[in-house]
Amino acid sequence: MSNGDTLDKLVVFLAKRDGIDKLVKTFQYVSKLTHWGAESSLPELAQRAKSWETASGLSRKAFRSGRFLAGFNALRRGPVPVPGELGALAVLANAGEMVYFFFDHFTWLSRAGVLEPWLARRASFVSAFGEAVGYVFFIAMDFIMIRRGLRQERELLREGAKDAAEKEVRRIRVDRVMRLMATAANAADLIIAVAETDPNPFCNHAVTLGISGLVSAWAGWYRNWPS
């Protein structure tokens, strides 16, 4: 697909579950910012934007059906094949992510009217708590890997320019960019999770949530876009 044009790549991107999720997430948080900006001056537009935001949020929860199995399978198969702190961090990160996606089912079904409405708040809290825990450990893992990559890159550069070394340096730099994108997305989503578990004026402000959601969505676009 590297020789395809933009439309070819967009088709491949949207064929992925993560691709659809990032597109609808963009809709969700653009509409949140639109609602905030138009609430006082254009109430009808604001109401339409709010409806779009709500529909997008529910749609994303539907797309994530069964996704908790990825975290469960990662735990079942054991930690990543890297000794030391990364293995422990991977277990904690995947456990948090599994809790997040599992309880997200109950939030979705409750808000859709299938389950009792009171369940939505409780399930959402547990889901967001697991999400926050997972993001903290995923961020820690990425920082560790970025630090290791920087050390390895410096060692390779000290050895002098060789074809194999140059390829490895390029690989390390690409990996670093991807990990920085992942860190940006996870940090933004962590803010959204904190807004659910520990409401406060900063995290719960519409602008904070809107920008955080778009940062996460667009970082996901970058990471999942076909090369």
Image (cartoon, rainbow, N blue to C red):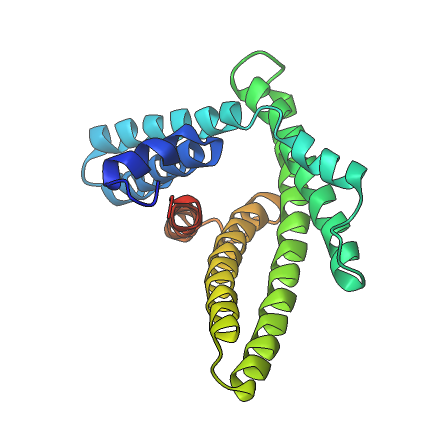
Q: How many marks?
A: 0
Q: Is residue 92 left or right of residue 13?
A: right
Residue 122 can be seen, yes or no: no
User: Which residue is located at x 34 percent, y 26 percent?
Assistant: 51
- Coordinates of residue 53 in the picture (x, y in percent): 37, 31
Quarter of the figure with the N terminus: top left
User: Which residue is located at x 51 percent, y 16 percent?
Assistant: 112
Q: Is residue 138 left or right of residue 25?
A: right
**Looking at the rendering, which quadrant does residue 106 occupy?**
top right
| Vertical relation: 207 (above or below) 51 | below
| Vertical relation: 200 (above or below) 54 | below
User: Which residue is located at x 44 percent, y 47 percent?
Assistant: 220
User: Which residue is located at x 74 percent, y 51 percent?
Assistant: 80
Q: Nearer the viewer, residue 151 or 35?
A: 151
Q: Spot the residue most to the left.
A: 41
- Coordinates of residue 31 in the picture (x, y in percent): 31, 37
Residue 36 can be seen, yes or no: yes
Q: Is residue 40 left or right of residue 217?
A: left
Q: Nearer the viewer, residue 136 or 222?
A: 222
Q: Spot the residue most to the top.
A: 114
- Coordinates of residue 134 in the picture (x, y in percent): 66, 48
- Coordinates of residue 141 in the picture (x, y in percent): 66, 60
**Looking at the rendering, which quadrant does residue 57 occupy?**
top left
Q: Nearer the viewer, residue 29 or 141?
A: 141
Q: Is residue 95 left or right of residue 50?
A: right
Q: Nearer the viewer, residue 3 or 42?
A: 3
